[in-house]
Image: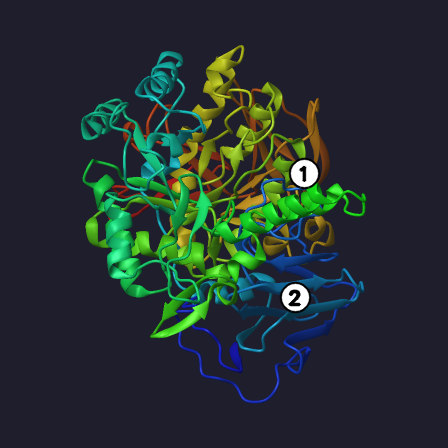
């Protein structure tokens, strides 16, 4: 059951697609106050678990911390960080009753979930203009599925996007990209995508290509395609201010950029220097900006990743002037009364300043709306602009599209990656815990930068992370300029990496089937154990093991120097290891706690009692993957419903695409 409560005059976010009539009176739980902004307060029972919040820090159970949903360009994801790149305002309270709460509010909102007081949930925001959806169900899982229906179907990428992708900030020349492909093919390491970070552009200008390095870009795209590789370029939010640059010129002429209060185009510095931001909350501007993707689609590109769209701001001229004034005062002070910290504080406030977010405006249905009041919608609508345009530019095929910043609703247009993580062991665990929460908010095509984006990875960290990345729909190795090069061929014994990536390709028939079932059935791809074993108290506490579909449990090794790990099995399961010599080990383990050994070059998984899964033969690209014949592993007599299609068609259904496989 879904109930809608409306407070004040909410901004329409288009997060919800299902029509719900407004409910009179008060919600069935919680106390609401609207005198000073908005607050929702509810007393939590000791046994209550709180799920949700999508891309957020810490665990699957969100109790015990304070989360501030404000899309933020903050790359150092330490445990005390309260804001990440996304804002997903959906939580599920699961205990005696199971209730979902979606606070449809487009800017900063705080979820204090037992942080200030252990037994109290408090949700607060500055304005009492929002919609609150309350969902009641028989279980947390039922609530989530109802919410998934409420917000509409998840984005479906092309099948090649389930292959492996290699990326690095620092690939600049044609030779850089060619070397990646050559080394992968030489070592027979599967590869379907190579990502193009900001250096492929001309002076970091969107929808341009460096003509010196890529004099015939369509021919280069085709050359890569002939080697089985899709190039996936980045698109940033800021449009460079430069006379003669068509995107800039046309945007200024048509008034399509965000404005200052005085009506002038707002300026802020990002990678290209001073830029304007397209007013993507305006449907006309979305259509205009989205149509610029045609430049690269016409060159043969069939995948994009949108970045810097919180939107990230390095500085504004106004902010820079404030720093200059602070510095001048400090240097002119001969008394020592001014501390150097005043200058440091001014510098620290320069990037992504709250003052800058108050300096520019969007035009929505003829009304000017200050950006900070709708801040969390920018990345969503940038990707919406791309998704809507690509559906027109390529109506009969799927285009790969994912984004750094997002809000609920963007899941209909693209996937997400979790941004600039670090080469830390703790970030493997953060990656694991974040996946089901993102699924709960509709984001099925998701993943993290495997091996870590910042800092210097190690061989063992990368191998362990990859062994989990085998199961994430988006599987990409990505790293930052200035860090250790972490392509697989940079390390000794690259055959270990080849084996792990090959396991991914063998599993694609299963992973793709489960993804499609989740996308087309408003279900989850990743689930917490508690969703399938709600009456098992131990299963409800396990957060470092996840269910995929209804057949497989994954329990990655995520600790340095570990030779294995302890796992909890809620029921008898088949423990399977993919060994580097191409063989499988299969051991039936009873319910309970077990220590399992897993070498660095092995991929473990568990198959539930009475189930089986399909495997393909090894291959080096998704295009070479064959589902005839398929091998099955699991329990004898079990059946599996396989979903398969051409991997490109936009019109997908579960009907007419299924085959029943039987394990003899």
Instruction: Provide residue 517's location: percent of width, then percent of height.
Output: 40, 51
User: Image check: 296 left or right of 407?
Assistant: left
Within-10-Å neighbours for mark 1: few <14, some 14–19, many 20+: some
Instruction: Provide residue 318's location: percent of width, then percent of height.
Output: 52, 53
Q: Quadrant of residue 422?
A: top right
- Residue hosting label 1: 590
Q: Nearer the viewer, residue 585 or 373?
A: 373
Picture residue at 79% right of the left edge, 64% below the top: 46
What's the image's color scheme? rainbow
Mark 1, secondary structure of its residue: loop
Give how far apart the Cα atoms at labels 2 and 1 are: 31 Å
Q: Nearer the viewer, residue 102 or 616?
A: 102
Q: Quadrant of residue 354?
A: bottom right
- The single residue placed furthest to the bottom in the displayed view is 24
Picture residue at 76% right of the left edge, 60% below the top: 115
- As displayed, is residue 223 above or below residue 331? above
Picture residue at 34% right of the left edge, 35% below the top: 232
Query: Where's the C terminus, which quadrant?
Result: top left
Instruction: Provide residue 465's location: percent of width, then percent of height.
Output: 57, 30
Within-10-Å neighbours for mark 2: few <14, some 14–19, many 20+: many
Picture residue at 34% right of the left edge, 36% below the top: 233
* Residue 584 can be seen, yes or no: yes
- As displayed, is residue 170 above or below residue 109? above
- As displayed, is residue 563 above or below residue 23? above
- As displayed, is residue 648 above or below residue 97? above
- Residue hosting label 2: 93
Instruction: Provide residue 400's location: percent of width, then percent of height.
Output: 33, 43
* Residue 653 can be seen, yes or no: no
Q: Nearer the viewer, residue 331 or 479?
A: 331
Q: How many marks?
A: 2
């Amino acid at each position: 059951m879904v109930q809608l409560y409306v407070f004040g005059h909410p901004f329409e976010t288009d997060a919800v697609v299902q029509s719900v009539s407004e409910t009179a009176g008060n919600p069935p739980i919680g106390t609401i106050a609207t005198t000073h902004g908005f607050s929702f307060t509810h007393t939590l029972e000791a046994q209550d678990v709180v799920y949700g919040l999508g891309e957020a820090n810490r665990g699957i159970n969100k109790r015990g911390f304070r989360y501030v949903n404000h899309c933020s360009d903050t790359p150092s994801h330490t445990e005390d960080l309260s804001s990440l790149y996304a804002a997903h305002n959906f939580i599920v309270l699961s205990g005696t009753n199971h209730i979902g709460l979606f606070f449809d509010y487009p800017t900063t909102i705080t979820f204090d979930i037992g942080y200030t007081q252990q037994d109290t949930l408090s949700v607060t925001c500055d304005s009492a203009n929002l919609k609150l959806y309350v969902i009641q169900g028989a279980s947390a899982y039922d609530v989530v599925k109802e919410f998934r229906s409420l917000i509409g179907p998840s984005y479906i990428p092309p099948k090649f996007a389930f292959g492996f992708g290699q990326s690095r900030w620092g690939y600049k020349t044609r030779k850089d990209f060619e070397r990646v492909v050559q080394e992968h093919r030489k070592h027979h390491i599967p590869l379907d995508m190579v990502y193009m970070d900001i250096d492929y552009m001309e002076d970091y200008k969107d929808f341009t290509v460096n003509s010196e390095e890529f004099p015939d870009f369509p021919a280069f795209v085709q050359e890569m395609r002939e080697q089985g590789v899709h190039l996936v370029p980045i698109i940033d939010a800021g449009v460079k201010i430069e006379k003669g640059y068509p995107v800039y010129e046309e945007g200024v002429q048509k008034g399509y950029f965000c404005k200052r209060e005085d009506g002038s185009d707002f300026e802020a510095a990002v990678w290209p220097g001073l830029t304007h931001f397209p007013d993507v909350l305006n449907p006309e501007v979305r259509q205009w900006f989205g149509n610029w993707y045609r430049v690269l689609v016409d060159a043969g590109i069939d995948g994009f990743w949108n970045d810097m769209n919180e939107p990230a701001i390095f500085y504004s001229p106004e902010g820079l002037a404030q720093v200059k004034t602070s510095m001048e005062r400090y240097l002119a002070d001969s008394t020592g009364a001014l501390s150097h910290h005043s200058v440091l504080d001014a510098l620290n406030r320069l990037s992504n300043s709250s003052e800058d977010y108050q300096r520019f405006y969007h035009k929505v249905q003829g009304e000017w709306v200050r950006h900070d009041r709708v801040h969390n919608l920018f990345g969503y609508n940038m990707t919406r602009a791309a998704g809507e345009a690509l559906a027109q530019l390529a109506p009969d095929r799927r285009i790969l599209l994912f984004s750094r910043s997002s809000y609920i609703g963007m899941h209909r247009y693209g996937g997400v990656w979790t941004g600039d993580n670090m080469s830390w062991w703790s970030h493997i665990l953060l990656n694991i815990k974040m996946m089901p929460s993102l699924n709960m908010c509709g984001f099925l095509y998701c993943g993290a930068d495997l091996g870590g984006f910042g800092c210097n990875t190690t061989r063992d960290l990368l191998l362990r992370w990859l062994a989990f990345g085998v199961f994430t729909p988006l599987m990409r190795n990505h790293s930052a300029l200035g860090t250790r090069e972490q392509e697989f061929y940079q390390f000794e014994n690259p055959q270990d990496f080849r084996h792990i990536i090959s396991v991914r390709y063998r599993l694609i028939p299963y992973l793709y089937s489960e993804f499609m079932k989740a996308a087309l059935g408003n279900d989850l791809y990743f689930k917490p154990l508690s969703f399938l074993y709600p009456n098992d108290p131990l299963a409800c506490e396990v957060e470092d093991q996840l269910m995929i579909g209804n057949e497989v449990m994954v329990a990655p090794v995520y600790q340095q120097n570990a030779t294995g790990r302890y796992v909890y099995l809620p029921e008898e399961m088949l423990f399977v290891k993919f060994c580097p010599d191409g063989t499988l080990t299969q051991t039936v383990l009873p319910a309970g706690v077990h220590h399992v050994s897993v070498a660095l070059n092995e991929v473990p998984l568990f198959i539930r009692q009475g189930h089986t899964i399909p495997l393909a033969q090894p291959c080096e690209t998704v295009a070479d993957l064959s589902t005839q014949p398929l091998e099955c592993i699991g329990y004898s007599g079990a059946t599996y419903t396989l979903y398969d299609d051409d991997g490109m068609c936009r019109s997908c259904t579960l009907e007419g695409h299924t085959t029943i496989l039987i394990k003899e």
